Image (cartoon, rainbow, N blue to C red):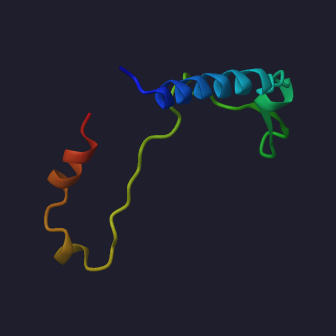
Amino acid sequence: MVPWWGEAIAALLVLVYGFLAILTPKPKPADPREDVYFDPKSKSNTRFPSIHDEATVDLTFVLPAYNEEERFRNPCPFFSFFFSF
């Protein structure tokens, strides 16, 4: 059996959820200008890339150069463990 205060808390949560659902603002309509940016190289508006587009940049990581031979004897197995797909 649920105590009376448990039911009161549940009812309060339902009321708060309904109150917030009613007061939540509607999303603003999309502006077509938000999909492009000005590219100074081509001097025109260019569409932002989508996550569904083909990749244009590969992942690059740089190893530190100071004492590289002493600190990283063979870094390939270490990095291949983390970056293997």
Q: Is residue 26 above or below residue 83?
A: above
Task: From the top left corner, tell me how far across and down residue 58 is, in percent.
Answer: 44, 41
Name which residue lies at 19% across and 59% down. 75
Left or right, residue 46 beside residue 73: right
Task: From the top left corner, tell me how far across and down residue 74 is, in percent.
Answer: 14, 61
Residue 37 in which image quadrant = top right
Name which residue lies at 54% across and 30% down. 9
Task: From the top left corner, tell me how far across and down residue 79 is, in percent.
Answer: 23, 52
Left or right, residue 78 beside residue 26: left
Task: From the top left corner, tell me how far across and down residue 2 is, in percent.
Answer: 40, 23
Name which residue lies at 84% across and 24% down. 32
| Closer-to-camera residue (46/43) | 46
Location of the C terminus by quadrant is top left
Location of the N terminus by quadrant is top left
Left or right, residue 21 beside residue 77: right
| Closer-to-camera residue (49/29) | 29
Q: Is residue 63 above or below residue 81?
A: below
Please tell me how many numbered marks the rendered image carries.
0
| Closer-to-camera residue (40/64) | 64
